[in-house]
Amino acid sequence: MQLTIDLPDELVEKLDIKQLTKEFIEFVVLKNKHSDELLIDLVNDLPEFPSFADQDPLKLQQALRDEWR
Protein backbone atom coordinates (compact mmCIF):
# COMPACT_ATOMS: atom_id res chain seq x y z
CA MET A 1 0.00 0.00 0.00
CA GLN A 2 1.30 3.41 -0.89
CA LEU A 3 -0.36 6.74 -0.32
CA THR A 4 0.77 9.90 -2.07
CA ILE A 5 -0.62 13.32 -1.33
CA ASP A 6 0.41 16.37 -3.34
CA LEU A 7 0.24 19.51 -1.22
CA PRO A 8 1.21 23.09 -1.97
CA ASP A 9 4.70 24.03 -0.74
CA GLU A 10 3.26 26.74 1.52
CA LEU A 11 1.18 24.14 3.35
CA VAL A 12 4.01 21.62 3.64
CA GLU A 13 6.24 24.22 5.30
CA LYS A 14 3.62 24.67 8.03
CA LEU A 15 3.09 20.95 8.69
CA ASP A 16 4.66 19.16 11.63
CA ILE A 17 5.35 15.78 9.99
CA LYS A 18 6.04 13.97 13.28
CA GLN A 19 2.76 15.18 14.81
CA LEU A 20 0.84 14.42 11.62
CA THR A 21 2.28 10.90 11.49
CA LYS A 22 1.47 10.31 15.16
CA GLU A 23 -2.11 11.47 14.73
CA PHE A 24 -2.54 9.36 11.61
CA ILE A 25 -1.31 6.21 13.36
CA GLU A 26 -3.52 6.92 16.37
CA PHE A 27 -6.52 7.37 14.09
CA VAL A 28 -5.91 4.19 12.12
CA VAL A 29 -4.95 2.00 15.05
CA LEU A 30 -7.05 3.27 17.93
CA LYS A 31 -10.21 4.36 16.17
CA ASN A 32 -10.36 1.53 13.66
CA LYS A 33 -9.00 -1.18 16.02
CA HIS A 34 -6.62 -2.83 13.55
CA SER A 35 -4.72 -5.94 14.57
CA ASP A 36 -1.01 -5.95 15.42
CA GLU A 37 -0.21 -7.54 12.08
CA LEU A 38 -1.88 -4.69 10.23
CA LEU A 39 -0.05 -2.17 12.42
CA ILE A 40 3.28 -3.65 11.32
CA ASP A 41 2.19 -3.37 7.68
CA LEU A 42 1.09 0.21 8.27
CA VAL A 43 4.37 1.24 9.87
CA ASN A 44 6.39 -0.45 7.11
CA ASP A 45 4.43 1.50 4.49
CA LEU A 46 5.01 4.91 6.06
CA PRO A 47 7.19 7.18 3.93
CA GLU A 48 10.69 8.10 5.02
CA PHE A 49 11.41 11.77 5.44
CA PRO A 50 15.05 12.73 5.03
CA SER A 51 16.70 14.40 7.97
CA PHE A 52 19.78 16.57 7.77
CA ALA A 53 20.35 16.60 11.52
CA ASP A 54 23.79 15.46 12.69
CA GLN A 55 25.25 15.70 9.20
CA ASP A 56 28.29 17.70 8.15
CA PRO A 57 26.92 20.53 5.98
CA LEU A 58 30.05 20.64 3.81
CA LYS A 59 29.95 16.90 3.06
CA LEU A 60 26.23 17.12 2.33
CA GLN A 61 26.77 20.02 -0.07
CA GLN A 62 29.61 18.17 -1.82
CA ALA A 63 27.53 15.02 -2.17
CA LEU A 64 24.63 16.94 -3.66
CA ARG A 65 26.94 18.78 -6.04
CA ASP A 66 28.77 15.60 -7.08
CA GLU A 67 25.44 13.94 -7.83
CA TRP A 68 25.06 16.25 -10.85
CA ARG A 69 28.51 15.63 -12.32
Image: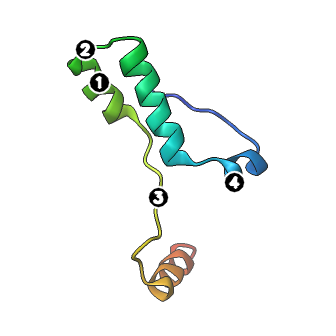
Distance of label 3 from label 4 (alpha carbons): 14 Å
Distance of label 1 from label 4 (alpha carbons): 28 Å
Residue occupying image coordinates x 44% and y 71%: 53
- Three-letter code, disc 2: Ser
Numbered circle sitting on residue 35: 2
Q: Nearer the viewer, mark 3 or mark 4?
A: 4
The tag earlier along the polypeptide, 1 or 4, is: 4
x and y, in percent, of residue 55 in the image:
41, 78
Q: Secondary structure at mark 4?
A: helix
Q: Secondary structure at mark 3?
A: loop
Contact, mark 2 vs mark 3 (Cβ under 8 Å): no
Q: Nearer the viewer, mark 2 or mark 3?
A: 2
Q: Residues within 10 Å of mark 4 (few under 14, many from 20)?
A: few
Contact, mark 1 vs mark 2 (Cβ under 8 Å): yes
Contact, mark 1 vs mark 4 (Cβ under 8 Å): no
Residue occupying image coordinates x 31% and y 34%: 44
Horizontally, is 51 left or right of 7 in the view?
left
Query: Mark 1 highlights which residue?
Result: 39
Contact, mark 1 vs mark 3 (Cβ under 8 Å): no
Residue occupying image coordinates x 31% and y 13%: 34
Q: Residues within 10 Å of mark 2 (few under 14, many from 20)?
A: few
Query: Mark 4 highlights which residue?
Result: 13
Occupied quadrant, residue 69: bottom right
Distance of label 2 from label 4 (alpha carbons): 33 Å
Horizontally, is 7 left or right of 67 in the view?
right
The tag earlier along the polypeptide, 2 or 4, is: 4
- Three-letter code, disc 1: Leu
Q: Nearer the viewer, mark 1 or mark 3?
A: 1
Q: Residues within 10 Å of mark 1 (few under 14, many from 20)?
A: some
x and y, in percent, of residue 63 in the image:
47, 78
The tag earlier along the polypeptide, 3 or 4, is: 4
- Three-letter code, disc 4: Glu
